[in-house]
Amino acid sequence: MMFRFAYPTLIPALGILFVAWLVVSYLRKRPGITYSMTSRLILIAGHAGALRGRLPAILRGIALVLLILAAARPQLYNVSRDIRSPGVDIMLSLDTSGSMAGLDFKLDDEPVTRLDAVKKVVSDFITKRPADRIGLVVFGEDAYTQAPLTMDKGLLLGLVKDMRIGMAGDRTAVGQALAIAGKRLKDLEAKSKILILLTDGRSNTGDITPIQAAEALKALGVKVYAIGVGGKGEAPFLVNTVFGRKIVYQDVDLDEDTLKQIADITGGRYFLASDTNKLSEIYEIIDKAEKTEVKVKEFFHYKELYLYFLVPAFLLIGLEILVRVVFVRVFP
């Protein structure tokens, strides 16, 4: 719930009137009688008498403030949104094998693992797709569905954040990852079915080859965007040795040819992400290529609060009248 004034412009305008009333009340000559020994009357009345004399004005001032606030219509409100869109179903299939521990990517000029860079970029991508259902598959030696297609972006972001190196094994089952993701898309009716495959290695395990899986995905109408991470050659890894933890360079074999075939078979595209900026650009390209027209209707629900100010104001005005009549006598 949020708070607002429906007529906020009344507050400064009526505030000026309130200040003017204070000035007039201060400058106006108070009613009274002429008496030669005024100083003795002050001693008799004391401070309590002076305060009692000002009480009606104080009550009237507070009542005026409350009336100003009531006139501005204070409200509590919330907003609900009805999103109408044909949408896109997107499965993210992300490699968490041991090679994703390579430290050749950076975030904020600090070296990070390939997986940490992927988690950051994928999280940004998920946030930008409020109208689409997105699912998540992680793979290594095995492939697991972390989340079926869902609109719950908070759930997805939490699962991406919790991804760890080797959580599905250290080898790379690309074909298995494609097959698992394809099962989540096959029976769905959507404007477009997209699978984003990200890996930095070569498929070296699994019962189904990447090409067989790609042919099956083509038959299901699923388009694959394949992203190769890092490239060929050596990459730095932080490893434990007898002399403690140190950086060593190891070969990482990225199978670009197979990833290109997967993309070509399914009508998608292949990208090579050599650093964090390039990876971000790739997801931006995919985001723009598969954009959906989102129609959003907003519904505002209000709870009026003016009575909480108006009723006390009337009570204070009534109390002021009572004080003037009963407790504070004014001589003509």
Image (cartoon, rainbow, N blue to C red):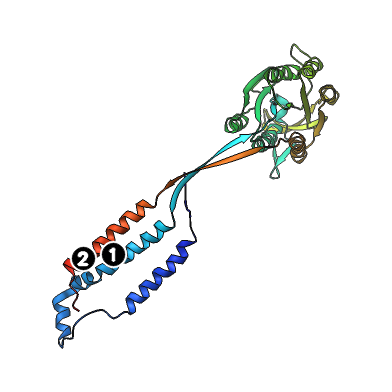
Instruction: Mark 2 or mark 1: name the one nearer the start of the chain.
Output: 1
Which picture quadrant has residue 59?
A: bottom left
Could you tell me which residue is drawn at 19 percent across and 67 percent down? 325
> Image check: 143 left or right of 4?
right
Residue 184: x and y in percent read: 67, 19
Front residue of 331/195: it is: 331
Total number of numbered labels? 2
Task: Name the residue that disc number 1 marks.
Answer: 59
Q: Secondary structure at mark 1?
A: helix
Front residue of 164/86: it is: 86
> Image check: 207 left or right of 310?
right
Which picture quadrant has residue 24?
A: bottom left
Asked if the residue at tag 1 contacts the one at tag 2, i.e. Cβ–Cβ closer than 8 Å, the answer is yes
**The C terminus sits in image quarter:** bottom left
Task: Name the residue that disc number 2 marks.
Answer: 323
Residue 145: x and y in percent read: 64, 20
Residue 191, above or below 175: below
| Badge 2 amino acid | Val
- Toward the front, the furthest residue is 332
Query: What is the CA distance from the residue labelled 2 to the residue labelled 1?
Result: 10 Å
The 10 Å Cα crowd at callout 1, few under 14, some 14 to 19, many 20 or more, is some
The 10 Å Cα crowd at callout 2, few under 14, some 14 to 19, many 20 or more, is some
Residue 255: x and y in percent read: 82, 24
- Toward the bottom, the furthest residue is 36
Q: Which mark is residue 286?
A: none
Q: Secondary structure at mark 2?
A: helix
Residue 239, above or below 183: below
| Badge 1 amino acid | Leu
Could you tell me which residue is drawn at 77 percent across and 25 percent down? 224
Residue 291: x and y in percent read: 73, 36
Could you tell me which residue is drawn at 69 percent across and 31 percent down? 115
